[in-house]
Image (spheres, rainbow, N blue to C red):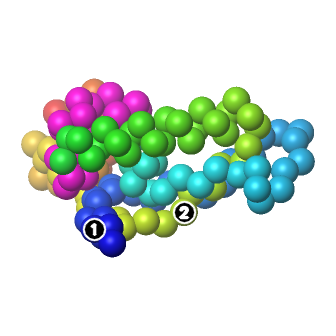
Amino acid sequence: MTRPKCCRRISALPANREYIPAGISYSDDESVSLTLDEIEAIRLADYEQLYQEDAADRMGISRQTFGRIVSSAHTKIADAIINGKKMTICDGPVSMHKVTGTTCTRCDQSDGMRCARRDKGRCPVCDKSN
């Protein structure tokens, strides 16, 4: 019997749960399922461009496990794009966890999540430069 998967931390749910290629009819056997932890791993590694060790720390897993999750997600996404398959995002062993952001020196508010404006020195609460 295999060991159960440990709970992985994610920071947000995806806006969409299905991606369907335009102009192609499909059936259920022509779909690829991604789990929430795979989407979070892709977001951290490819979108935020974090090193695997830093991304693994955010998800509460080992670097080796993070590497396996990213590799699995890349394979599934490539299959869906190359073969014109529907991608579905399904649940998995995850828990919601907000990333701690920095606090604005003017309004003393923390947005709880990092965002593009935060990285450019703009506070999303008071919208003033720090």
The image shows residue 109 at horizontal and vertical percentages of 18, 54
Q: Which residue is mark 2?
A: 90
Q: Which residue is mark 1?
A: 3
Of 77 and 50, nearer the camera is 77
Depth check, mark 2 against mark 1: the one in front is 1
Q: SS of the residue at dot 2?
A: strand
Q: Which mark is residue 62?
A: none
The image shows residue 11 at horizontal and vertical percentages of 33, 55
Q: Which part of the image, by quadrant, shows the C terminus?
A: top left
The image shows residue 82 at horizontal and vertical percentages of 70, 29
Is residue 54 found inside the magenta-colored segment of the image? yes
Outermost residue on the front side: it is: 1
User: Residue at the spot x=32%, y=67% of the render?
Assistant: 2
Q: SS of the residue at dot 1?
A: loop
Q: Which part of the image, by quadrant, shows the N terminus?
A: bottom left
User: Residue at the spot x=76%, y=56% of the render?
Assistant: 29
Q: CA distance from mark 2 to mark 1?
A: 21 Å
Instruction: Say few, some or many: other residues with alpha carbon within 10 Å of mark 2 (under 14 / 14 to 19 / 20 or more).
Output: some
Of 35 and 47, nearer the camera is 35
**Left or right, residue 5 beside residue 30:** left
User: Residue at the spot x=27%, y=47% of the render?
Assistant: 65
Question: Residues in magenta?
Answer: 44-61
Compared to residue 22, the image places residue 10 above or below, namely below
Instruction: Say few, some or many: other residues with alpha carbon within 10 Å of mark 1 (under 14 / 14 to 19 / 20 or more).
Output: few
- Residue type pointed to by label 1: Arg
**Left or right, residue 53 beside residue 78:** left
Of 127 and 94, nearer the camera is 94
- Residue type pointed to by label 2: Cys
Q: Are marks 2 and 1 in contact (CB under 8 Å)?
A: no
- Main SS class of the magenta portion in the image: helix
Is residue 3 found inside the magenta-colored segment of the image? no
- One can see residue 53 in this view: yes
